[in-house]
Amino acid sequence: MRYIKYALILTFGAALIAVALANRGMVSIQLIPSEVAGWFAMNPQVELPLFIIIFGGIIVGLLVGFVWEWIREHGQRAEAARQAREMRRLQREVEKLKGEKHRGKDEVLALLDEAS
């Protein structure tokens, strides 16, 4: 199984390197479109290889997806925390009631009573 994992990582890495080598041409990234840039006194732009733009877009998409999913699951996490608190409260109550039930009895008899 470990070798399959390494083979998949190696294949994925080779594919990423192939994409990077095939898309290493420089492209210009502008903050605002050229038509709108006339309204402002500046037009910031950066020259980057295309593969950096592609990989950056993938990473940004993954991060947005993770944050979106984390926000979406907030209700489920809150409900799970509420249920965990309720379960701990009920467990404490059961332990308290068991202690009251066996109060005044011999320890051995209380253990035998709990086992049955």
Image (cartoon, rainbow, N blue to C red):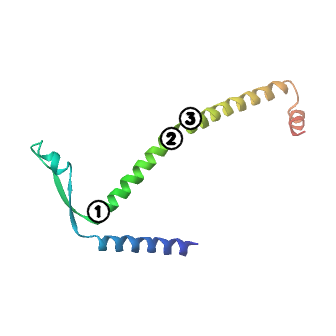
Q: Position of residue 52 (x, y in %)?
A: 29, 62
Reply above or below: 57 against 7. above
Residue at (87%, 33%) from the top-left corner?
Answer: 110
**Residue placed most toward the observer, 108 or 42:** 42
Give the residue number, with chain letter if any, for mark 1. Answer: 52
Horizontal and vertical percent position of residue 106: 88, 30
> What secondary structure is found at the residue carrying circle 3?
helix
- The secondary structure type at the circle numbered 1 is helix
Q: Nearer the viewer, residue 49 or 32?
A: 32
Residue at mark 2 to residue at mark 3: CA–CA distance: 11 Å
Q: Amino acid at mark 1?
A: Ile
Residue 91 rendering spot, x and y as whole percentages: 72, 32
Q: Quadrant of the N terminus?
A: bottom right
| Of residues 102 and 75, the one drawn nearer to the viewer in this rendering | 75
Identified at 47% across, 40% down, the residue is 71
> Looking at the image, is mark 2 or mark 3 earlier in the sequence?
2
Q: Secondary structure at mark 2?
A: helix
Q: Do the residues under discs 1 and 3 have CB atoms within 8 angstroms?
A: no
Check disc 3 and give the amino acid type.
Answer: Ala
For residue 72, which numbered disc appears in the image? Answer: 2
How many marks the image carries: the answer is 3
Q: Position of residue 87 (x, y in %)?
A: 68, 33
For disc 3, the marked residue is 78
Q: Is residue 76 above or below residue 61?
A: above
Of labels 2 and 1, earlier in sequence is 1
Q: In the rendered structure, which disc, 1 or 3, sits on the residue that comes first in sequence?
A: 1
Instruction: Report the amino acid beneath label 2.
Output: Arg
| Numbered disc in front, either 1 or 3 | 1
Whole-angstrom CA distance, mark 1 to mark 3, is 38 Å
For the C terminus, which image quadrant?
A: top right
**How many other residues sit within 10 Å of disc 3, few (<14), some (14-19) or many (≥20)?**
few
Discs 2, 1 touching: Cβ within 8 Å: no
